[in-house]
Image (cartoon, rainbow, N blue to C red):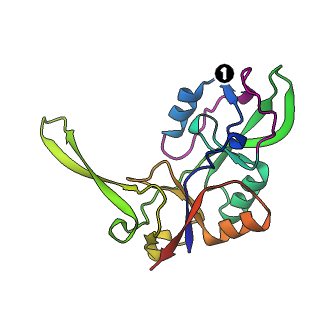
Amino acid sequence: MAWLIDGTPIDPRFNLGFEWVGPGTSAIRQLLTRPQALTDVPPLRLQRAQHSRNNSMPLDFFRPGGVWVVSDRFRTMVQQLEPQQNQFFPVTLHDKAGADLGVLFHLMNVTQGRDVLIPEQSDMYADWREVKKSSGEVVKLCLWDLHGHPKYLVARKEEIGAMHLWRGLTYLRLRLFFSDELMKRCEDAGLRELVSYPIAEK
């Protein structure tokens, strides 16, 4: 079995009010649109926003500006399962006054992309769009997406292979996928908090 990761809970506890300092959110997202390895990432820093009333420390997963930032415990798990496959860049966290909070987190760049789900057998819908090619020709493309809270998801076992952490390739590109082993390690270690859905393999 594998797992689809649909982000973190929509809950004030997970909206910690951190903002990127230096490269802004759009610049961070631009970094992560590049394929595979990143080599020129500037020092990354997050500071608690002045308007934030939440003084909680981050849990193991949070998404400032929609970008995955993960704890060092999670990074270690992934590196044990897939050494050198994905990328993690240190992020320093600061309070409102700019003082370092002294916790170790990482910007996560998931470099593996693969479409493992069988859309016709999963709780997904086809979104047809017209795209104009450079030649002027208009073609229709089918982009599959999830229903709000998918009740069933089915994947091709051979497509998953030995992967432990990956993202969608042509569809569900903003979602992550965990192997059953990675999810089990997260649960055993008490890592939280994720919105996840089980995927049956065939």
How many numbered marks does the figure carry?
1
Q: Residue at x 78, y 49 (%)?
A: 72
Please tell me whether the stretch drawn in magenta is mainly helix, strand or loop: loop
Q: Percent from the top left, x then y, of residue 62?
A: 68, 44
* Left-right relation of 145 to 111: left
Q: Residue at x 63, y 41 (%)?
A: 63
Name the quarter where the C terminus is drawn: bottom left
Asked whether residue 42 is drawn in magenta, I would say yes
Snapshot quadrant of residue 131: top left
Residue 56 in view (yes/no): yes
Snapshot quadrant of residue 45: top right
Q: Percent from the top left, x then y, of residue 70?
A: 70, 47
Q: Residue at x 71, y 36 (%)?
A: 16
Asked whether residue 32 is drawn in magenta, I would say no
Q: Percent from the top left, x then y, of residue 171?
A: 39, 53
Q: Which residues are magenta?
A: 34-58
Name the quarter where the N terminus is drawn: bottom right
Instruction: Check disc 1 and give the amino acid type.
Output: Gly
